[in-house]
Amino acid sequence: MTAKIIDGKAFAARVRRDVAAHVKTMKERHSITPGLAVVLVGDDPASRVYVKNKHASTVEVGMNSFEHRLPAETSEGDLLALIARLNADPAVHGILVQLPLPDHIDSALVINAIDPAKDVDGFHISNVGLLGTGQKSMVPCTPLGCLMMLRDHHGSLSGLNAVVVGRSNIVGKPMAQLLLGDSCTVTIAHSRSQDLPAICRGADILVAAVGRPEMITGDFVKAGATVIDVGINRIDAGAGKTRLVGDCHFDNCAAQAGAITPVPGGVGPMTIACLLANTLTACARSHGLPEPEGLTA
Ligand code: GUN
C-alpha cells in the first residue's frame, strides 16, 4: 500500500487564509480586531523561535499581536500581575504563556490565573474539565489540528478505533477526549503499555505523541490505517548534521498506512494555525458573535 501524505503545511495555509478572511469581516462589520498576547519569560532559544513565529503568523492574518518578553529572573508575582492586566484588557482576546517557565515559577498557578475565556492554549483547568465533559471550551491547539486533518481525510470518524500513544496533558489526553467526542472507540496507550504493537495494530486511527524518535514502526500499523505523527525530534544525521524525525518511522509506517502525516510538514504547521483559530473563536465568543465554522472542535 502507498499511503496518502496528509499535507499539514498546505492545510495550515488554508486555515490561516480562512482565519484572515474572518478577521477582515470582523474589522469591516464590527470594528473589532482580534488580539493575541504572548508572554515569554527568559531566553530559551527554542521558545524564542516559537514566539517569533507566532508573532509573524498573528500579524499575517490581520490580528493584533502583543508580545511580552520578560527576563528569566521575573518573579511569580510580577508574572501574575501581568496576567491580571491582560485578563482585564479588552483588546486582548487570547493569552498564551510560553512553556516551559523558569523553575522558580509555578506553571500551573500561572496557567490557571489566565481568564479561561482567553486561554487559547486550552490548558486552564476549567477548559480541561469542560472538554472532558463534552462542553464548549478552548481546545489545545495541537490536538485540534490533528482532529481537523482527521475530519478532512475521513469525513465522519464515528465508530472508528483510535489509539493515542502518549498521555500528556497537552496532546495525548485532550486528543483522546476529542476523538471520543467524534464517537471513536478510544484507547490511550503509552510507553509502559504491554504489547504496544498489538494495541496499535487495532487502530484505524493511530496518533503518535510519545516523544521518542521513530519508535512506531510498520509492525505497529494496520494496513490502511491513518497515522498522525505528533512527534518532532531532532536526531544526529552524521557528519555533524541533524535532522527532524517524528515518533513514527516514516518510510516503514507509510508502507502500511492508508494515510500519514510527514515530519516536518504535518502536525507542526497546524499548531500555530489552530492558535490563530482559537484566538478568533475567543474573540467571537467575547463579543457574542457566531463562532467561525470549521475552526473549532
Ligand atoms: N511550549 C511548547 N509547546 C507549547 C504550547 O503549545 N503552548 C505553550 N504555551 N507553550 C509551549
Image (tube, rainbow, N blue to C red):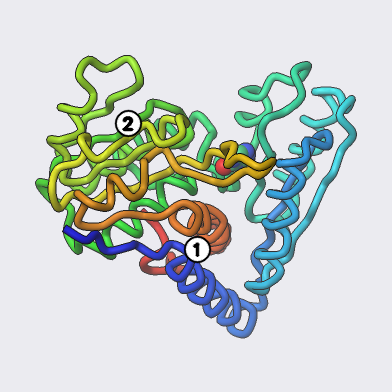
Foreground residue among 256 and 35 = 256
Closest to the observer, 137 or 46:
46
Q: Where is residue 67 in the image (x, y as percent from the top left)?
A: 80, 52
Residue 25 is marked as none
Q: In this view, does 223 lie to the left or right of 285?
A: left
Q: Which residue is drawn at 46% across and 73% down?
A: 14
Residue 115 appears in the rendering: no
The residue at 60%/29% (across/down) is 112
Residue 241, picture quadrant: top right
Q: Where is residue 165 in the image (x, y as percent from the top left)?
A: 32, 31
Q: Please, is residue 45 above or below residue 165 in the view?
A: below
Q: How far apart are marks 1 and 2 (CA)?
A: 37 Å
Residue of label 1:
288
Q: Position of residue 53 (x, y in %)?
A: 69, 57
Identify residue type, mark 2.
Val
Q: Tell me the quarter of the image containing the N terminus.
A: bottom left
Q: Which amino acid does label 1 sit on?
A: Gly
User: Position of 88 compared to 269: left or right?
Assistant: right
For label 2, the residue is 165
Q: Is residue 265 above or below residue 96?
A: below
Q: Does the residue labelled 2 lie within 8 Å of ligand 1?
A: no
Figure quadrant, ligand 1: top right
Determine whether the residue tagged by mark 2 lies in a helix, strand or loop: strand
Among the two numbered marks 1 and 2 on one chain, the one whose residue lies closer to the N terminus: 2
Q: Residue at x 73, y 49 (%)?
A: 49
Q: How crowded is mark 1: few (under 14 residues within 10 Å), some or many (20 or more)?
A: few
Q: Which of marks 1 and 2 is in front?
A: 2
Which residue corresponds to the image point at 26% horizontal and 63% vertical from the top-left? 4
